[in-house]
Image (cartoon, rainbow, N blue to C red):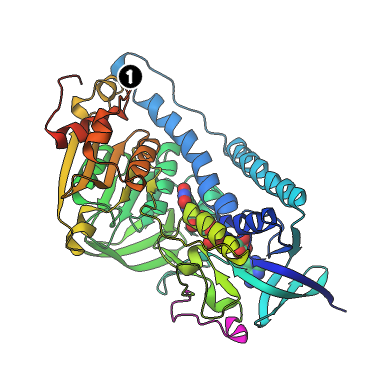
Amino acid sequence: MSKDIKTQVVVLGAGPGGYSAAFRAADLGLDVVLVERYNTLGGVCLNVGCIPSKALLHLAKHIEDAKHMSAEGIEFSEPKIDLDKIRKHKEKVIGQLTGGLDQMSKMRKVKVVNGLGKFTSDTSLKVEGDDGETVINFENAIVAVGSQSIKLPFVPHDDDRIWDSTDALELPFIPDRMLVLGGGIIGLEMGCVYSALGSKVDVVEMTDQLVPPADKDIIKSFMKQISGKFDNIMLNTKAAKVEAKKDGIHVTFEGDKAPEKPVKYDAVLVAVGRAPNGAKIDADKAGVKVTDRGFIEVDKQLRTNVKNIFAIGDLVGQPMLAHKAVHEGHVAAEVISGQKHYFDPKVIPSIAYTDPELAWAGLTEKEAKEQGVDYEVAVFPWSASGRAIAQGATAGMTKLLFDKNNRIIGGATCGPNAGELLGEICLAIEMGCDAEDIALTIHAHPTLHESIGLAAEVQEGSITDMP
Ligand code: FAD
């Protein structure tokens, strides 16, 4: 017999979008049920995304740093890799965070129902769980069912040497030779991890640059710093055939940098993007429109075409990032509680937590051109930064974009800790700062974030001589 629950708000999916929406709605005094098909909260981000990848990248960075200190006079012996301990460390980090979410749901009296949820009408959901079926009758729903890795039709995904990001994060083994198929952020982050652990890593990317959304000049700086980590970066090239054979995965390439013969790999990571889960929740039974690609369209209040049903996170479009999902979740909950809020940010920062990091926010130069925005660019190369010289990061750069009124509209950095530096650029754009505001802000010396102040001084024409 099925259980029946009545609630003011049901949230379907407990990733960063879903749990943030549920918590905000509960904080606003609403009665909330959170539905999640897995037994842990946190979604892709906490369990198989942002957090485990960063735990591994942190270890990888230590290995890389130790490798490269001999020129400065310090030599370490070869690192001994204990994959079991690394896996345990990663699981501990995940557990700490997902456990924290359990506590927070309890504190807020958010009722968690585990099981696969599907709509049965515009006011009801059916959840199939291990302990039977639950029917949830709701006044409002927030759909946050996220996305999953895209599979390629010509790739034998059932072979355990062919990985998606979730498989790669499990660290099944350290391949001698590995191919990262797709030169986007997720593939490159995992490529950096495996390269540090000892794999020879090739990267194949169909377009003419790694991380296609970023500007060419910042990618030039990125390539200078990252190319040593990878054996072969094949741009303008695609994997045309992937065959799983006994002795390895044989990949045939086509394009500018394609090797003449198929190349044999011990593992292939397919990282060609993520597809939304919109088509899997019987949205039609609630009257909610889903696009051919599985996205759900929403307005600036995150409302779908059905008045009492909202959608957030990866499910509603690019950029598929956790912080975007969180902010959307907050807005959806606030709108349901009667507040007149909108999701209308000036910046949604993007960061590749590779080694080096690559980070950008606001308009890129590409976007400024496409949108016909009048802009000026100010660049501060890290070869002129005392701190960057001291830590051997002279190939890094900071770039700011200003509009015709000298107001900052975008920015990007590449080098160690670039992601941390980006916070200042985001705030400056949201606050509508002009170049003078940034240039007159005293930045501590010697820091890498000083490069942001110095780029603004370049724009002001008032650059000083202090590197
Ligand atoms: P998700 O996190 O996908 O959560 C959706 C939840 O819904 C899941 O828990 C799922 O089990 C549940 N669900 C789905 N269908 C149902 C159903 N029918 N019934 C019940 N439950 C259901 N983003 C960043 O901002 N920074 C990063 O560093 C970063 N690193 C990443 C690294 C990797 C390897 C990957 C794969 C992604 C990374 N991302 C990163 C992206 C980030 O994880 C996503 O943007 C984010 O998790 C999206 O949140 P969400 O709430 O929309 O959905």
Q: Give the x, y percent position of residue 155.
A: 42, 69
Q: Horizontally, is 304 left or right of 242 in the view?
A: right
Crowd class of label 1 (few under 14; some 14 to 19; many from 20; radius 10 Å): few
List the single residue furthest toward the top. Answer: 73
- State the residue in front, 313 or 222: 313
Residue 336: x and y in percent read 61, 66
- Quarter of the image for residue 72 reads top left
Q: Quadrant of ligand 1?
A: bottom right
Q: Quadrant of residue 287?
A: bottom right
Q: Is residue 61 visible?
A: yes
- In this view of the protein, which residue sits in the foreground, 300 or 174? 300
When the figure is inspected, residue 399 is found, relative to residue 334, above or below; the finding is above
Residue 293 in magenta stretch: yes
Part of the protein shown in magenta: 283-295
Residue 17 vs residue 184: left or right? right
- Residue 399: image location, x then y, percent: 22, 41
For the point 24% across and 31% down, the residue is 439
Image position of 145 (left or right of 253): right
Taking the magenta stretch, the answer to whether it contains residue 256 is no
The residue sitting at 75% across, 60% down in the picture is 112
Q: Which residue is mark 1?
A: 70
Mark 1 falls on what kind of element? Answer: helix
Residue 288 at x, y percent in the picture: 55, 81
- At label 1, the amino acid type is Ser
